[in-house]
Amino acid sequence: MTNSPGVADDARKRLLPDLTPWRESPGFRRLWWSGGISGLGSVFALVALPLQIKELTGSPFAVGAIGIAELVPTIVFALYGGALADAVDRRKMALGTELALGVLSLLLLANSLLDRPMLWPLYAVAACVAALQGLQQPSMEAMLPRLVHPDQLTAAIALSSMRMTAAVLIGPAAAGFVVAGAGIPVSYGVDVASFAISALLLTGIRPLPPAGDVEKASLRGIGEGIRYALRRRELLGSYCTDMAATLLALPIALYPFLADELHARWALGLLYSATGVGGLIASLTSGWASRVHHHGRLVLLGSFVLGACMIGVGFAHQLWLVLLLLVVGGMGHFVGDLFRGTLWNGSVPDRLRGRLAGIELLIGASGPQLGDIRAGSVGARFGVRASIWTGGVLCVAVAGTLAATLPSLWRYDARTDPHAAARRAEA
């Protein structure tokens, strides 16, 4: 007995990504392409910059110092960028910072073409890029809910995540070939061109001025956003799951040591990309996500799956099993991020959306860096395996504790939540 065409079509819709936002919103299409092109170009600079510092200094510490140069500007400007996103036209903010980022890439290109490239501009540009991204990202994030219908928000976030994951997987390999074959200046040139195309796409998006009464960006305004997040216990819980995932269950710094323990140094690249592959698989099969309304439960479930998989990685001794667990963990991480983003974008009022996006950026930027510190310090004291599986245990414990102690997160239903209803009324 064969299935009817209607049943097959329905099953396909439940599995494949929902392309409705991409089809119906020209602004979202432009934002999607803009982010994809500039993100892919930035990967070329991210590959070329540490390589150039290595060639100039031969020092691992000098290469690692890029992170030090980027950390403080990210922390400082993420919150201020969120305040600006609520006080100015978000399209103009995104466009202006995109142009400024293109100028910085042009400076990297000019420096690389010198007979004797200078070292200090590389750190200065890295710090300035981190500051500009801190200013830009909250506006980019806060643009999304204004460009799509509330019912299409989950699908739009899934499509955006799919774009970012694909860039992360494809970009490094492509950049590596370009750097090796054509040289560092060409990689910087690709980055410059990507910003130019991205800025051109952003000019086609309609203006997105702040709604209602506007306050100037200030410390008081930033404090208002923080107080709002603290009052919303379901938001607070979603922040905690995000921090738990990146701080405890993504021990990327340990992958070179894990590859050695598995006697598979050749597979280091596979370890790095496995969670991204899982995220891409989940995004390509996310058609079901728009039908989910209990977003908090999926946030918790995604964190639980990631933590459980990392426990398995800590004890697995077969490469294929480690890679499988990392892929499944990446799928869980994607699901948690998807519904966390839907909860945030679907229930935070537009007048505060930029400031909340700044908080999200701060957590998203600091979590992986602190996670590397945790993983490395625990690994040095108790061993690589212990660092991995204990991080997974703690991640699972955090998810379980939040499910038990924050019933508002577990019970959150976008159909009945008053904050979500108010957000829909704004759209």
Image (tube, grey):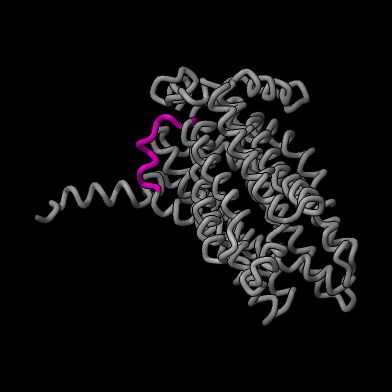
Is residue 295 found inside the magenta-colored segment of the image? yes
> Is the magenta region chiefly helix, strand or loop?
helix
Residue 149 as seen in the image, left or right of residue 254: left
Residue sticking out furthest to the bottom: 181
Residue farthest along the left direction in this orientation: 1
Quarter of the image with the N terminus in it: bottom left
Residue located at (62% from left, 41% from top): 393
Rendered location of residue 131, percent (x, y): 77, 46
Counting from the top left corner in percent of width and height, residue 285 is at: 39, 52
Q: Find out whether residue 128 is within the magenta segment.
A: no
The number of numbered badges drawn on the structure is: 0
* Residue 427 shows in this picture: yes
Which quadrant of the figure contains the C terminus?
top left
Asked if residue 342 is positioned above or below residue 30 in the image, the reply reads: above
Q: Residue at x 67, y 35 (%)?
A: 358
The answer to whether 70 appears left or right of 250 in the picture is right
Name the residue nearer the viewer: 163 or 298.
Answer: 298
342 to 171, vertically: above or below: above
Where's residue 383, x and y in %? 75, 54
The magenta segment is 286-296
